[in-house]
Image (cartoon, rainbow, N blue to C red):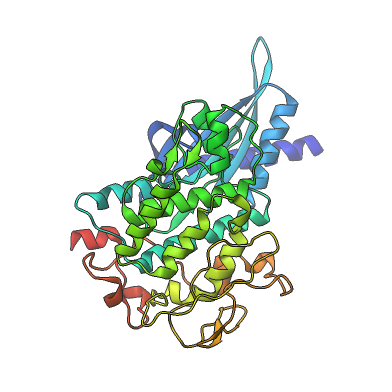
Amino acid sequence: MGADQSDANEMKTQQQCQMFLLQYSKEKDSDHNQFGLVKLYTHNQNNSMICIKKFQTKSDTELTYITNHLRKRKIFVHPNLVQLLAVRTSNEQSICSDSSLVMVVSEFFPDTLESELKKRRQPLKRYPESHIWLLIQQIVDPLAFLEDQKQVHGDIQPQNIYLDETGSVKLAEYNYFPGGQYGFQKMLLSKDRAYLSPILLNNYRNMNFKAQHNEYKSDVFSFGMTLLEVLLLEESYDCMDFQNGCILQNVVDSKLQKVKASNYSQLLTNFVREFIQIEENLRPSWNDLKQVIDQFRDKICNMIPFYQEKRQMSPTKLVYQSTYIPQQHILSSPQSKILSSPRQPQMLYQTYLQPQPLYQTKQMQPIPMQQSIYYESGQKQVPIKKITKLEDTVSKQVQQPENNSEKTTLKQSETK
């Protein structure tokens, strides 16, 4: 009877899978940068896409490893993460051996931050600062979530930052599908380029596959290099001396000066500088960064410029978590009124000369993991691709909160 019930469940699963796939038309096979060989399908009505990847397993051990990996990933639900939709296994018998086939159905997003940057280079159309902060928020949030799950991304660069049809960020970590490789591993195998942290860059020079480093802090550095590319609309590989295995600090400093000269705020410039500290223990963790974002979240999501420098504020010594002692100080917010976090109200600073730290102290109650997911803040996701007229300066953009319904996507603005 138990076997009959199992067969019935399997049949039901097969029928559900077939009904689901009938909604899609196969488009093409693709050798994807992160996912490897996949088959792409497009929805018959709304043009959304999925991909299907198949794994042929030759042993029970391999089958168990792959299915456990995929089922664990399937429960990682976050609005800025690519989602696994279904995992299905079936047995295949041949004359030579028995094997199992694992079929995985996943979301797929063809648009990337890399493709958006290419559009903005000719002619040069820099992002308004309000959209840079949206990008930071939509990347920090899911990576802080993954950090809580003890999972690293492993290859942060524009081509691996996906954008859905509304322009919101979607991320997939290096081992989203079993067998995925870090950006560092791809470089060692001459498969691709990556924004390597100083430690990984030195190990790359020595062709050392077993680099000892803080994987999360290496990701933070990669994100800093990515942000420099976004801000200046030029690749950041010239900051890296691959032959000698080191970061060219003078080039980094020059780029940060160009960021400031491009009418971006000192707050943003110093914030990016924190990401690309040479010593990894001086860089913030993803949860450190999320604590900063949480205090400005309402402003960021409503595109209200909290970063405008109406008057120069004195730097304040920040209080960080025990593992993070910054070399550079982030300037206090240039506004003199009180700002508060949407979940844990607190004053950013009380008076002009007595600023409160951007980061929470170690003694404060941590935000519970279930509250760290962005959509529980009650805010609506604001796509980074939503833009107004490109020639508007940051200072003219948002003097009052915008109505989300009035924002236009990049595609809409291009057609106007």
Residue 99 is left or right of residue 134, and the answer is right
Whole-percent x, y for residue 271 in the image: 48, 64
Residue at 51% x, 83% y: name it. Answer: 339
Taking the view exactly as shown, the residue that stands out farthest to the top is 96
Residue at 41% x, 44% y: name it. Answer: 239
Residue at 38% x, 82% y: name it. Answer: 311
Q: Quadrant of the N terminus?
A: top right
Residue 363 is left or right of residue 114, and the answer is right
Query: Is any atom of residue 278 visible in this view?
Result: yes
Q: Quadrant of the C terminus?
A: bottom left
In this view, the residue in front, 93 or 264, is 264
Residue 360 is left or right of residue 229, and the answer is right
- Tell me which corner region of the image, top left, top right, bottom left or bottom right, holds residue 325: bottom right
- Tell me which corner region of the image, top left, top right, bottom left or bottom right, holds residue 415: bottom left
Query: Is any atom of residue 162 visible in this view?
Result: no
Residue at 55% x, 67% y: name it. Answer: 375
Taking the view exactly as shown, the residue that stands out farthest to the right is 1
Whole-percent x, y for residue 238 in the image: 38, 41
Residue 46 is left or right of residue 180, and the answer is left
